[in-house]
Amino acid sequence: MKKFLFVVLFTAVSAASASASYVPPAGEVLTELSRRSNLPEADLQQSLANCDANQINTNLCAYRDQVAADLTLKHAIAAKQAQRADAFNEKIAKWEKKRDAACAKSAAREFGEGSMRPTAQAMCVAAETKKMIRWVEGQK
């Protein structure tokens, strides 16, 4: 049973690490492991140098791998959020250009070159922006 569990865990860890392109630096993993375990980094380095020495070392090595996986996940999430933010900002920039052009056209159509044109254009931009705010706030 222990051998089976080890094979299952090893396969899962190998598959997870094979699919992740980011590998956190060993120093970052050690620092985070130290923070989470409240053990000094020097003590952890000694224990991690020989994972098979005893059960405590084996546990710490497994915990190290867990911490590394957590850091990899956090990196992947941050990268996805950045990608989505970039795409979202591009969409907003395109929308702003369309909004500004539509409001300028509308104000010109209603007021020509009259003194109310800038006011009408500003009111249109504000109204359209408020609509966009409601839409953005409604997104999940």
Image (tube, grey):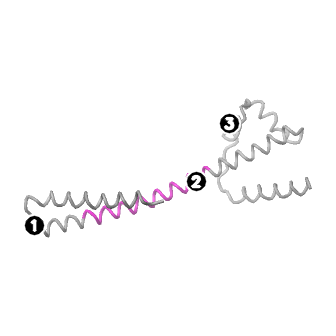
> Rounded to the nearest whole Å, what is the CA distance between mark 1 and mark 3?
66 Å
> Rounded to the nearest whole Å, what is the CA distance between mark 1 and mark 2?
50 Å
Sequence-wise, the earlier of marks 1 and 2 is 2
Residue beneath disc 1: 112
Residue 81 located left or right of residue 44: left
Q: Residue at x 82, y 55 (%)?
A: 10
Residue beneath disc 2: 77
**Marks 1,3: beta carbons within 8 A:** no
- Kind of residue indicated by mark 1: Gly
- Kind of residue indicated by mark 3: Thr
Q: Quadrant of residue 58?
A: top right
- Kind of residue indicated by mark 2: Ile
- Magenta-tinted stretch: 74-100
Q: Position of residue 114 (x, y in %)?
A: 7, 62
Residue beneath disc 3: 31
**Depth check, front residue: 48 or 128:** 128
Sequence-wise, the earlier of marks 3 and 2 is 3
Q: Residue at x 79, y 40 (%)?
A: 60
Which label sits in the foreground, 3 or 2? 2
Residue 119 located left or right of residue 43: left
Circle 3: is it few (<14), some (14-19), or many (20+) Cα within 10 Å? Answer: some
Q: Is residue 86 magenta?
A: yes
